[in-house]
Structures are given as structure tokens and as C-alpha cells.
Amino acid sequence: EAVGNRMCYLEDISNEVCCPDLASCVFLLEQAVSVRALQEMVNTTSAESSASQGGQTFRTLLYGHAVLLRHYRSQMYLSCLSTSTSNDKLAFDVGLKDDAIGESCWWTIHPASKQRSEGEKVRFNDDVILVSVFSERYLHAYMSNSERGRVNASFRQQVWSLVPISSGIARIKNPGFVLGGDVLRLMHGNMDHCITTPPPDSSTIDDAGSLFIKGGTACSQARSLWRIEPFKTKWYSGFIGWNALIRLRHITSGLYLAVLGDENGPRVTCISKKNASPIAITFELRMSKEKQSEENQEEEDNLGVPTIKYGDAIVFIRHVDSDLWISYETLQLTIKGIGKVEEKRIIPAVEGHMDDCFRLVRAQEQDQKTAIVIRICSAMLGRFNRTDPISIDSEVINHLLSKSDAIQALLHDLIRFFAQPSSSLDHEEKQLHLKILKNRQDLFQEEGMIRILIAAINFFSERRDKSTLLEGVEEKIEDITNKLYVVLAALIKGNRANCSNFAQSARLN
């Protein structure tokens, strides 16, 4: 996600049982130039000349061209870094960079097959070789000590395949249609209510995986965001059509919408990627609940046709394996300080209600980005949100040592994420930046991140005061604790609601 970690790794797409995170594997072919034009761009000292040279890009990719690949989710560039963490000390790490300055972000593309030659058009599914312009090394995959494969720039040659995901022209010509990988909200009928999870500190729900239909502020919170994912790899981000097989991933938790059966019957819940079997998480969008012919309708291996439009199309969600519809039941819950309230809980049903339909509403770009950051923070810092005292033994110290660098990098990125606008900005740009910043602060607070940060501060503060820490751990814990305070201050600065939430007497005591 390029939050706390810029290094690239490999995602296994061959395992049908474990859902691959294809949304994080998408790269945009932003620019393609001849190697000669690239050298002129890099060597020029004039900004105007650089801008004019940057415009000499090709619409058709040819072998021998230098390409600029932008990671679609993070909007950073695939780069050959100057560090080396693999066992091959002649290789360089491959990761993401914020900008495309210099040669490190450029790669030349060459044919792996003798049937192709330099100057020919690059075709989809061609076997290609990518060479870093900066280091003159091949883009290479290798297995690290961790379970995931890693990527570096090595003298060892590696063959890659270009798999088409989507088309920029098709997106421009057909705005407002649902595409694979989009982040959206599932609005109930024509009402301002959506499918969402309970608040992180909710104590009124017995099943933590329960889902509800809520209105009001729930429709603007991060926990009501879902990613719609087709099962195919090729044209993953193509147009979603009726009856297409999909899965729905909850953004802030990373869990998948599923229908599971037990002794009490089927229920709708959210399950982890590790437990997400295709049978449990496969859904389809239908125009109506009418029975359809059981003909095998194989999905076309192309971009698809723009069919389902945001805000207009009314869809019914069917669980494929159980042939049950996503519906709801009305419950009476007792909430402390409020009393009894009626809640609509999501359930699977044979027939359900007449109003079991949903509208798809696309999420704002900033909300999507913030929700992903919330998920990463919850995963990394949430482990310190515990009340039981933990003795400082060797196991805890080793765990801190193994994760401290990642935590430090995450906190560094969070400080940038919540940075105040620069004083050099004009008034209009500054106000826009402040508006985005306040929205990020609000989304974080609504997901209980202030509580998680305070728990992490308490955890590391207690460890910092212990005298049994190994040499080298004390400095890291000191740095982590200081950064946690900075992030907490950035999270409440200029935000009255967050300041009020932080200054509750029970919390301060």
C-alpha cells in the first residue's frame, strides 16, 4: 500500500483458495519514450525544455522504449532503489518513489521471444524483459526469508508477462459506470442508508462480524466502504455487468463479505482473507429476484460493456452457492445512554423483502486512501491495544526488534499524512488542504484510532522505563514513543471534535 513500506513484493494469483489482492498489483503505463529522448529529458537543466520533452511520449508501446510505471493505488512510481537487502549484494531493491526525477523510475522493455524484435509493437500477454535504466539490471523476482516473494534489480534475467487490466480511454468515454476494483458504498434502496459494520468499541453486538443498515453519519464513515472485485485476473478492472461473479472486500478491516452456515442456519458475516473460500464469498449482482435459466454463462475475456451505473442502477445481491439474497431483519438493541433502538441487521434470505435492493455509490478518492491507511494502522498498532500486563521477556523483545523498523516507517508516513499545509500556499489551496486534513482526522477518530494510539503510547512508555531492555532496543522504543505523540498531536490539531474526544476526563484519568 506504500504506507510504512515502499518495497515491492509478489502476490500469488495461482492460489484459488486464498484471494489475491489484485487491486494492489495494478500499474499504469504513464509514459513511453525512446531512450534518446529520455537521456535528453534527464540531462536538460531547463524546466521548460524538460516539460516540452516530456510531451514527446508515444501512444503505441514499442520494444526498446523506456517506460514509466505508476502504481495505481499509491500513485507512486516503480523504481530501482539505491539500497540492497537481498542476499545478492550486486542487486538493488525495487520499490516505489514519490516522484519520477532522474533515471531510477525508468525501465526499458525488451522482447523475451525471438519472434519479436526491437521496434515492434508490444502486445498484451507478450513475454517481456524489463531493464532498469538507472542500474542496467533486470527486474527480477526471488524468494526471501518471508513467505512472500520479493522483487529486485539483478543481473539475473527474468521474464514477465503484461496482463491487461483496464483501458484509460474506455474510462474517459464511459464515466460513472462500475468497474472492477472500485471502492463504493452499498446504499439501501433510494434511502440514505448503507451497509456498514458496528463501531470499533461497540459492546451491544454479540457477533463481531454482524453487518447493519445504518443512516446518518454512517454513510460518510470509512467503515461503510467496500471494494468490488471480480474473480478474473485479465481485465480485472473492466466493466462489471449483470450476473458477473464478484467478491466484496471491507476496506478498513480487509475482511470479505461472506455467507456461512452453522447449526443455527446461514448468516452473513465478514471473514479474513485466509479463511475466504470462493464458495463462501462469491456473489453476483442481479437486476431482479426472478429465477434465471441455469445456462453456463462464461464471462467474456475482454473489457466488458458499461452496464451498471453509479447512483442509477438498482441491484439485488445474490450469494451464488446458497442461492440466498442479501436481506435484513429488524432488531431491538439497548444502547447505553440512549435506550432501546431499532437496528436493521443484514441476513441471508430465501425471498427477503421487496426493498432488498441496493444502489452503488462510488467513494471519494480521499476517503478511499484514508480507509486503507486506517486498515494498516489498525493491523500494526492495534496489537498494542491490550489491557493485560505483558512482562518484558525475550519473546517480546525479539518481536519489537523485528517490527520496530516497520512501525517507525509507518509513523513517519502518518506524520506526513497529517501534516499541516505549507505557509507558502495561497489562501484557496491552504483551505482545500485543511478541508482534506480535517476529513482525514474525522475518519480516523470514528474508527477508534485515538484510542489505539493512546494504548500504543502506554505500551511503549512502559517498556521504555524498563531497565531489562537489550542494547539497541531502547533508542528504537524512544523514537517510536516520540513519533506516536507527534501523530496523536497531528490527529487532534485544529479539530475541536477530536480535541474534545481526547480530553474526556475518563481518558485522562
Image: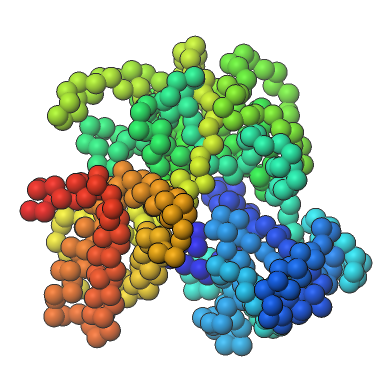
Is the residue 228 above or below the residue 321 in the image? below
396 sits to left or right of 14: left
- Looking at the image, which residue is at 39% across and 52% down? 434
Q: Residue furthest bottom?
A: 90
Q: Residue furthest left?
A: 509
**Which picture quadrant has residue 422?**
bottom left
Provide residue 127's location: percent of width, then percent of height: 79, 64
Q: Residue furthest front?
A: 427
Q: Residue furthest top?
A: 354
- Looking at the image, which residue is at 72% across and 80% down? 44
Identify which residue, 133 or 415, lies in the foreground: 415
- Looking at the image, which residue is at 22% across and 36% down? 203
Provide residue 43's location: percent of width, then percent of height: 71, 82
77 sits to left or right of 493: right
Provide residue 381's location: percent of width, then percent of height: 31, 59
Whether residue 155 can be seen here = yes
Is the residue 95 above or below the residue 44 in the image? above
**Which picture quadrant has residue 301?**
top right
Identify which residue, 491 or 135, lies in the foreground: 491
328 sits to left or right of 50: left
Identify which residue, 259 or 190, lies in the foreground: 190
Whether residue 42 can be seen here = no
Provide residue 7's location: percent of width, then percent of height: 52, 70
- Looking at the image, which residue is at 59% across and 73% down? 94
